[in-house]
Image: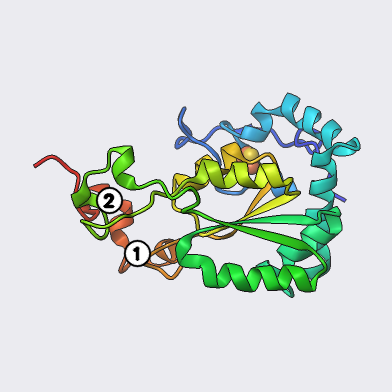
C-alpha cells in the first residue's frame, strides 16, 4: 500500500523549469497528492501546507460537523459512484446527515425545477422550503439601476435579493440550503449570509443550458474566446 506522506515515499519536490511563483495545482503535471506515485513539483501546495494537513486531519478525526459531512460525502461517493444523479446524491446527503429542513434558494427562472426538487425532498420525508430570488420585491430602480438597464424598461423589475433569501432560510432554521441557479455573484452573497451549509445543485448558464462546463469542453473550437478575454461580448455598460 502506498505511503500517504510524500516524503516517506522518497518523493522529493521536483524542480521544473516551468515552475514559477504563480504556479499552483492547475500547473501540476502529475497530481501526485492523489496517489503519491510521482515526484511533487517545487510549487506543490501539499508540501507547502503540511501544518494545514495535520490540522485538518485532526478536524476530520474529531466529532466535528466538518468530520460528519466529510464522512457522509465520502460514503455517497463510495456507495453510489456513477449510479446516482446529483439530485439523488443531494437528497441522500440530507438524509445521511439527519438534516430535515431543506432550504431551496431558487432563481425565478428555475422555479419549475425547484418545484420538482421540493417534491423529491418530500418523497424522502424531508421538509423543503423554497425561497425565490425576488423575495422582498425591491425594484431595481430603488437600488440605482437606470431604467434602461432593466430587462423590460418602463416596468417594475425586482432585483434579486440573495441576502434576504439566506436570512429568510436562517429564520426558518434550515439544516441545509440548496442553490438552484442563482446568478453569479448573487450565489456568493447567498453563501456568505447562509447559516446552514450550502450545496449547489444547479449552476445557471443562460447560454449553455445550465451546463457551464460545456464552455471548457468547446474551448478549442466554438468557445475558444474563453481563452482570450478581449474577444468576449462587449459590455453594454462599457464607456464608449
Ligand atoms: S497539491 Fe501538489 S501534487 Fe497535488 S495537484 Fe497541487 S501541486 Fe500537484
Residue at horizontal 27 percent and vertical 58 percent from the top: 151
Q: Nearer the viewer, mark 2 or mark 1?
A: 2
Pick the front one: 239 or 169: 169
> In the image, residue 112 lies at what x, y percent?
54, 72
157 vs 85, left or right, is left
Residue of label 1: 220
Q: Contact (CB < 8 A) between labels 2 and 1?
A: no
> In the image, residue 114 lies at what x, y percent?
59, 67
Is residue 145 visible in the rendered image? The answer is yes
Q: Residues within 10 Å of mark 1 (few under 14, many from 20)?
A: few
Rendered-image quarter of ligand 1: top right
Disc 1, ligand 1: is the CB inside 8 Å?
no
> In the image, residue 178 lies at what x, y percent?
64, 56
Residue at horizontal 71 percent and vertical 72 percent from the top: 120
Q: Residues within 10 Å of mark 2 (few under 14, many from 20)?
A: few
Residue of label 2: 228
Residue at horizontal 45 percent and vertical 37 percent from the top: 18
Q: Quadrant of the C terminus?
A: top left
Among the two numbered marks 2 and 1 on one chain, the one whose residue lies closer to the N terminus = 1
Give the answer, above or below, for where 179 lies relative to 54.
below
114 vs 109, left or right, is right
> In the image, residue 95 lies at what x, y percent?
83, 61
Quadrant in the picture for residue 92: bottom right
Disc 2, ligand 1: is the CB inside 8 Å?
no
Element type where label 1 sits in the image? loop
Residue at horizontal 47 percent and vertical 46 percent from the top: 161
Q: CA distance from mark 2 to mark 1?
A: 12 Å
Disc assigned to residue 70 = none
Element type where label 2 sits in the image? loop
Is residue 85 visible in the rendered image? The answer is no
Q: How many marks?
A: 2
Amino acid at each position: 500500500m502506498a505511503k500517504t506522506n510524500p516524503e516517506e515515499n522518497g518523493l522529493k519536490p521536483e524542480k521544473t523549469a516551468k515552475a514559477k511563483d504563480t504556479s499552483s495545482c492547475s500547473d501540476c503535471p502529475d497530481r501526485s497528492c492523489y496517489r503519491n506515485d510521482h515526484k511533487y513539483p517545487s510549487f506543490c501546495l501539499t508540501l507547502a501546507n503540511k501544518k494545514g494537513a495535520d490540522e485538518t486531519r485532526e478536524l476530520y478525526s474529531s466529532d466535528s460537523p466538518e468530520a460528519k459531512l466529510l464522512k457522509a460525502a465520502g460514503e455517497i461517493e463510495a456507495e453510489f459512484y456513477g449510479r446516482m444523479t446529483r439530485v439523488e446524491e443531494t437528497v441522500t446527503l440530507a438524509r445521511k446527515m439527519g438534516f430535515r429542513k431543506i432550504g431551496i434558494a431558487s432563481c425565478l427562472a428555475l422555479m419549475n425545477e425547484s418545484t420538482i426538487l421540493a417534491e423529491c425532498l418530500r418523497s424522502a420525508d424531508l421538509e423543503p422550503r423554497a425561497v425565490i430570488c425576488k423575495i422582498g420585491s425591491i425594484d431595481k430602480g430603488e437600488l440605482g439601476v437606470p431604467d434602461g438597464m432593466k430587462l423590460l424598461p418602463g416596468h417594475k423589475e425586482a432585483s434579486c435579493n440573495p441576502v434576504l433569501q439566506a436570512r429568510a432560510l436562517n429564520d426558518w432554521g434550515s439544516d441545509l440550503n440548496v442553490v438552484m441557479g442563482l446568478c453569479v455573484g448573487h450565489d456568493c452573497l447567498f453563501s456568505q449570509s447562509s447559516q446552514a451549509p450550502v450545496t449547489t445543485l444547479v449552476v445557471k448558464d443562460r447560454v449553455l443550458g445550465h451546463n457551464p462546463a460545456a464552455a471548457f469542453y468547446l474551448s478549442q473550437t466554438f468557445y475558444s474566446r474563453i481563452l482570450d478575454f478581449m474577444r468576449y461580448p462587449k459590455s453594454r455598460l462599457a464607456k464608449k
